[in-house]
Amino acid sequence: MDKNSFIDKYINQINESGFKVVFKKIDSESNPFNSITDLHEYLSNKIHNEFDSHKNEIYLNWKKENFVKARIKDIANTYKFKKGHLEDYLLRLVGNKMCDSLENNKIDSIISDFVNNIENSYSDVGFKSIKSDFIKVFKNSLLFNFQRGFPINLENLNSGVMTANAGDSHQFLFLARAILAGFNCSNVDVRSSRYDAIIDYNNKLYKIQVKGITSSESTIKFRDRDRGGQGIDHTHERNRGKKITSKDCDIYAAVDKNTGVCYLIPMNWVDENKIETLRISEIKRFKESWDIFKTLN
């Protein structure tokens, strides 16, 4: 059985939960894929190469379903795509269409009404003084809002490569934000280091560990990721992620990879309170807290 025939036969099951168990039971002689990862990479390349030629009809089919996400699975089965991949491409397409509407000034009146409502509600705070700047930044940020954050993996890189690159991107997002904030800072290139960046504040160096988070992520874990991959036992003690403490870094910088928003959390506070995890709702005081360095010894 070749790969296309395999996809034709199993696509409905692929798009159901628990296919990993089914995959392991398939006779290796009739399975052209070496692993479930190999299968997912193949499907990722498939939609990357084929989506553009079908996107208009797929979009219209979804429109007939009133853009209900639950209906994407049926469309994915029809076109032999992985449901999660198709959903991502469709949501990106919707974002592009919204961006086109924004560029064509079709929603200017909506934005104007929204801004006027803010001005009327917060005139006593002084919103009028920042109104023009707010409109400029707001319109530009809408491009990313419609795309649910910064564009991710448009070139369909291998998932392992993309994960490593994404980690680097979070560091550079933090560095860019720190430089714009006026700090003298530098990246740490040694990947085995327990910190990712250094900030020079009042002639003292502070070690920063940078981690990427998403807007929907509910918790921050003060622990390295477990080592994983094919042939690696992630349950073995030496492959388990180590606890992050103030001995490793002075600041834990959680960077929202969708927006670039930074949460600067002092590790001495984490240690003193014996914190293992934090919900985002619990660290609002550290959101964009660039003055945190004034409080460090």
Image (cartoon, rainbow, N blue to C red):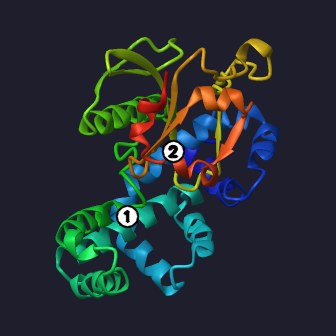
Q: Nearer the viewer, residue 6 or 65?
A: 65
Residue 99, placed above or below residue 228: below
Q: What is the total number of numbered labels drawn onto the structure image?
A: 2
Residue 170 is drawn in which quadrant?
top left
Residue 29, placed above or below residue 281: above
Q: Residue at x 24, y 75 (%)?
A: 102
Determine contact: label 2, label 1, CB under 8 Å.
no
Q: Residue at x 55, y 70 (%)?
A: 75
Residue 67, placed above or below residue 208: below
Residue 127 is drawn in which quadrant?
bottom left
Q: Nearer the viewer, residue 229 or 202?
A: 202
The residue carrying mark 1 is: 145
| 202 to the left or right of 75 | left
Note whether residue 34 is visible.
no
Q: Nearer the viewer, residue 12 or 255?
A: 255
Please give the label number shown on residue 81.
Answer: none
Q: Residue at x 76, y 19 (%)?
A: 233
Mark 2 element type? helix
The residue carrying mark 2 is: 286
Q: Residue at x 62, y 55 (%)?
A: 281
Give coordinates of residue 3: x percent, y percent. Answer: 57, 43
Q: Nearer the viewer, residue 133 or 161?
A: 133
> What's the residue type where badge 2 is placed?
Phe
Give coordinates of residue 95: x percent, y percent. Answer: 36, 67
> Which numbered disc flags the more N-terminal residue, 2 or 1?
1
Give coordinates of residue 111: x percent, y percent. Answer: 28, 81
Give coordinates of residue 54: x percent, y percent. Answer: 38, 67
Mark 1 element type? helix
> What's the residue type where badge 1 is placed?
Asn
Q: Nearer the viewer, mark 2 or mark 1?
A: 2
> Disc 2 versus disc 1: distance between alpha carbons?
23 Å
